Amino acid sequence: MPAFDILGKPYTSEILELPDDYEGAVTATLVHRPAQAENPRGAVLHLHGYCDYFFQTAQADFFTGQGFSFFALDLRKYGRSLLPHQTPNFCLELSEYYPEIDAALDRVRTREGHERVLLSGHSTGGLIGALWAADRHTDGSSVVDALVLNSPWLDLAGRFYIRTAGTEAINRLGQRRPYAVLPRSVNGVYAETLHTDYQGEWTYDFTWKPRESFAVRAGWLRAVRLGHRMVHRGIDVGAPVLTLCSTTSTLGDAWSPEAARTDTVLDVKQIAKWSHQLSRDVTVVRVENAIHDVFCSREEVREVAFASVERWLPYALREPR
């Protein structure tokens, strides 16, 4: 049963019990904030990114203010759902997350009575959500009415070699030694753009979202690259898609004012390009001065992003203007 969440009233959360996997017991967590409207327009189901969990209350404020009931899912091995015996944020296939998305959607539709559902996904959550929606659409299920993707991770940033021969090396290592830790340099710049301890506006738990991220393991990255390959070949989520991302990407070793107004994680040109492989009906909005999590950008920037969503929703949901 739902109980008050760590975010406090009016947020509640409940544990979704799931079948054991190769590491043992598995749970996910569904967070809920009720709509402000007496007769909601529908519900939003949000999926977070990598090294992430739901804390982005500005997004919930916006959607509940628009008349939607807001739900956010902490996937297995992330945030509220991370159990002591589990490898943080790890999977062997992105489809491992489908059971908790299905379970969350069942509660949103069956128990809460929402016929209209909008799927929201940030970064890796955008990739997972799009693949899930496309697979369910292929199976003949119309699972969601629209998707809002916030800087979805649709390709591997970096040099061409990394995305080609490097990916093949990852694929082989991920099959043989899925828990192998891949060498990489994480400088914490993105965390500094977010957290109030540094240059940001947000407070979150560094245990669940470390400043320098969790280790990236070969099996997990192999799963992500297989997901990227599916997107590049073209999928159909069966619903209109709105993708929001920054106008610019920058990579730096130390925090600078530029980091606070650009995507320091992904290549926004890739995001814009590959978004058109998700559906027959795709809108891409490039938000000037946005960071990687567009809805965590400075207030005046995220208000521009929210205004774009507000304008798009009546079209996507076929509402009278």
Image (cartoon, rainbow, N blue to C red):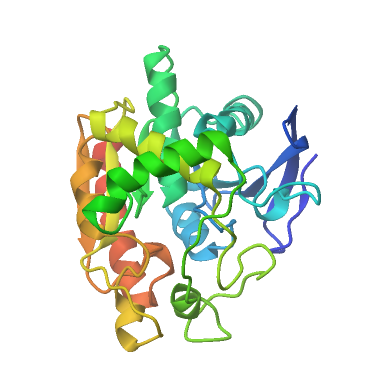
Residue lying furthest top: 140
Whether residue 50 is visible here, answered yes or no, is yes
Q: Is residue 156 left or right of residue 210?
A: left
Front-most of residues 252 and 160: 160
Whether residue 320 is visible here, answered yes or no, is no
Q: Is residue 10 left or right of residue 136?
A: right
Quarter in which the N terminus is drawn: top right
Residue drawn 45% across the image and 53% down it: 63
Instruction: Point out residue 192 in the picture as x, y percentages from the top left corner.
Output: 48, 80
Front-most of residues 184 and 77: 184
Instruction: Point out residue 89 in the picture as x, y percentages from the top left corner.
Output: 61, 49
Quarter of the rendering containing residue 27 = top right
Q: Is residue 124 left or right of residue 308?
A: right
Residue drawn 28% across the image and 67% down it: 304
Quarter of the rendering containing residue 225 = top left
| Up-down relation of residue 286 to residue 225 (above or below) | below
Residue drawn 23% across the image and 39% down it: 315
| Up-down relation of residue 231 to residue 83 (above or below) | above
Front-most of residues 248 and 42: 248
Instruction: Point out residue 9 in the picture as x, y percentages from the top left corner.
Output: 71, 61
| Up-down relation of residue 65 to residue 213 (above or below) | above
| Up-down relation of residue 201 to residue 91 (above or below) | below
Quarter of the rendering containing residue 169 = top left
Quarter in which the C terminus is drawn: top left
